[in-house]
Image (cartoon, grey):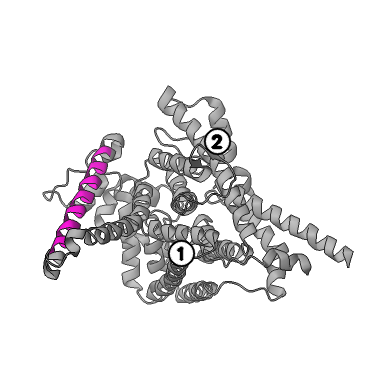
Amino acid sequence: MKDKTSWQARFQKITDLLWMIMIAVLPVTSMPLMAKLLGSDTVAAPAILVALFFTLIWFIPFLWNRGSMVKESVPLLVFFVVAVFVTVLANFRGVPAYKGINVYRNAIEAVITLVIGIIFYLLTSSYVTSDKRAALTMRIINWSGLLMLLWAGVQAVAWYGFGHYPQWMFDLQGMISSRVLYRQRINGMALEPSWFAHQLNMVYLPIWLSATIRKFTAHKWKLWFLSFENILLLGGVGALLLTLSRVGLLGFILMFTFLLIRAHTYFVDKILQIPFLQKKEGLSGKQKHRFVVWISLILIVVYLMVIVLGLWIFSRVDPRMESLFDFSLGKKNPLLSYFNELSFGERVVYWLAGWNVFTQHPLLGVGLGNAGFYFPRAITPYGWNLIEVMRLMYRTSILLNVKSLWARLLAETGLVGFSVFCGWIYSLAVKFFKRSHSQNTLESVFSVAGIFVLFALLAEGFSIDSFALPYLWVALGLASADLRKDVELREENE
C-alpha cells in the first residue's frame, strides 16, 4: 500500500513538473530545435512537444480511468468531427492542383494542427481542477511572463535607446526563434511582433487585467500598493504598444470595451440615484429617460474622441499608418487602395479570397488546409496588382493561407463548421459570464479573463489562422476548468 502511495506521489510530481514546463515555455513560439523535431518552420512551440508527452503519460490514462472532461468539450469535439468529415469529403470530391503540393499530406497536417489545439484545451480544462493547481498555474504564467517582458524590454532599450541591436541579441534570439529581431517593433520571444501581441492578448493581459480588477494576487508580496499582477499588466500594455500590432491593439481595446460597457452602465445608474432626480417634484419619468439618453450620447461622443485621438497618435508613431486619415473615393477600388496604403492590402486580399472560396462552397467548405488551392481563382482582381501577392503566387512554392481564423473557418468548414465552432464559443461565453461573480476567487479571475479573451478574439481572429498556436486554447481551458477545493485531498487519500 505504501509502495502504491509512494508511486502515486512520484507520478503526481512528474505530471506537475510537466505541466509547469508546458506553461513556462508558452512565450516561445518557434524554437529552431523544435522546428526540426516537429517538421514545421513556423509554429514550433516547445509547449507542443511537452503537451504531446503530457497527453501520453497523463491524459490518456486519465480518460482510461473514466476521468471527466468539462461539458464544453462536447461542442468542440463535435466541431472536430465536422471538420474531419468535410475535409475527407472535399478530398474525395477533388481539389485543384497547385504547384505540385500534395493535397492529402496538406490536409493531414491541417487536421493535426487542429488536434494539437484541442489537446491544449482538453489538457488545461481537465488538469486544472483545484485551487492549488490554478494558483500554481497563475504563478508560472506570471514568472514566465516576467521573463518575456524583460526580454521585450531589452529589445526596446536597444532599439529606441541605441538605434540598433548588438550581435549577442541576434544570437540569443536566433536560439529562441526561427526569425530574428525587427526594426522599431519588439517581438519578445515570438516569431514576429503580431504573434507576440497575440500571446499577450490571449493569455497574459486578460489574466493580469482580471486579477487587477478582482484585486487578487497569486503571490504574498506587494511593491507598495502594487501586486505582481498589477506590475505585469503595466509592463504588458507597454509591450503590446511597442509591437505596433494594429490588430493586437484593437484586440486589447475590445477587452476594454467590455469594461467600458460595465462602467457606462454603472455611471448611468449612479446618475439616476442623484437626489434631485429621485424627488417627486423633480423630473418626470419621461424627462429622466431623456436625461439619461443625453448623458449616454455625450459619453459616447467622448469615447469616440478618445479613439480618434489615439488613432491620430498611432498614425504619427507607426509609419504604416501615416495615411490613416487620407481616404479618397476618387481612386479605382478605393477601399482596397486605402488598405494597401496602410500596408494592410495584402492581408485584406487574403481575407477576401477566403470569403470568395466560402461563397463558392458555402455549406461544407473545401476542407481543412485546402483554401489555398482555390486562391488562383478566388483572389480579387485588385490583388494581382500587389507585389507580395504576385511574389508568393509566382516565385515561391508555398501554399497561400487565409490569414484569418474567421475567414478560414468559413472557407474550409462552411456554414456547418463555422456554426458549430461559434456554438462552442457561445457555450464558453455563457459559462464565463455566469461564473464571473463566483465565490471561488480564482474561478472568478479566470472566468473574467476568459471574457476578455473572447472579446479580444473578435479582432485576433483577423490576424491569426493557425489552430496550433496554444494561447487561445490554454486561456479558454483555464477559464472553463471546474475548480474543486477537495481534489488534492481526495487524490492524496486514494
User: What amino acid is found at the position of numbered circle 1 in the picture?
Assistant: His
Q: Is residue 181 above or below residue 488?
A: above
Give the total number of marks visible in the rendering: 2
Q: Is residue 475 left or right of residue 354?
A: right
* Of marks 1 and 2, the one in the foreground: 1
Q: Which residue is drawn at 67% across and 63% down?
A: 55
Q: Which mark is residue 173?
A: 2
Q: Is residue 68 left or right of residue 84?
A: right
Q: Which residue is drawn at 36% across and 73% down?
A: 361
Q: Can you give x and y, in whole percent of width and height, for residue 479 in the image? A: 51, 62
Q: Is residue 180 something one can see in this rendering?
A: no
Q: Give the range drawn in magenta.
A: 290-313
Residue annotated with mark 1: 437
User: What amino acid is found at the position of numbered circle 2 in the picture?
Assistant: Gln
Pick the residue in front: 145 or 355. 145
**Element under label 1?**
loop
Q: Can you give x and y, in whole percent of width and height, for residue 212 in the image? A: 46, 49
Quadrant in the picture for the N terminus: bottom right
Pick the residue in front: 337 or 468. 468
